[in-house]
Image: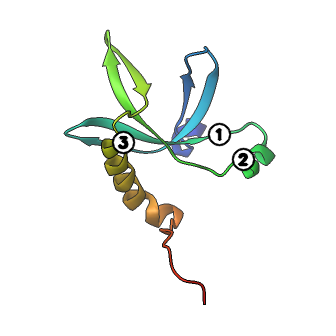
Amino acid sequence: MNNNEYGPDIITVVDENGKEHEFEVLDAIETEDGRFLALLPTYDNPSDSIEHDGELIILAVQEENGEEMLVTIDDDELYDEIADIFEERLADLFEIEEIEDSPEN
């Protein structure tokens, strides 16, 4: 039996400088605009994850020469639309609360 069967889905992304980064895939969606992944950076040292804010990374899946690549979403409107979808889908799982501007009591 594979021990990773129920573990997190980890992918390695190589940036433009050739440096490898590991991310946990939290969710994936497909819309008429393409396929998108919601990723969370992983750290070898648990204390490193505490120092970072756990910001969700959203990338588009693009196919080039038969290979899938992850790319940033340059269109701000599309990014916001995809981010909203992921936020809604992941809110219950991670108890994400929307930050609202409300007056102090």
Q: Residue at x 39, y 50 (%)?
A: 83
Identify the amino acid type marked 2. Answer: Ser
Q: Which residue is mark 2?
A: 49
Which residue of the protein is positioned furthest toward the left in this rendering? 32
Quadrant the C terminus occupies: bottom right
Tell me which label, 3 or 2, sits earlier in the chain: 2
Which image quadrant for residue 43?
A: top right
Name above or below for residue 97 compared with residue 66: below
Name above or below for residue 68 compared with residue 25: above
In whole angstroms, how far apart are the C-alphas of marks 3 and 2? Answer: 27 Å
Identify the amino acid type marked 1. Answer: Thr
Q: In the rendered structure, are the residues bearing label 1 and label 2 in contact, judged by CB atoms less than 8 Å apart?
A: yes
In whole angstroms, how far apart are the C-alphas of marks 1 and 2? Answer: 7 Å
Name above or below for residue 70 compared with residue 76: above
What's the coloring here? rainbow
Q: Which residue is mark 3?
A: 76
Nearer the observer: mark 3 or 2; the answer is 3
Tell me which label, 3 or 1, sits earlier in the chain: 1
Packing grade of label 2 (10 A; few <14, some 14-19, many >=20) is few
| Left or right for 76, reference 2 | left
Q: Residue at x 52, y 38 (%)?
A: 9
Q: In the rendered structure, are the residues bearing label 3 and label 2 in contact, judged by CB atoms less than 8 Å apart?
A: no
Q: Considering the numbered disc 1 on the image, is that residue within a helix, a strand or a loop?
A: loop
Q: Residue at x 75, y 49 (%)?
A: 51
Which residue of the protein is positioned furthest toward the top in this rendering? 65
Depth check: give the residue in front, 36 or 79: 79
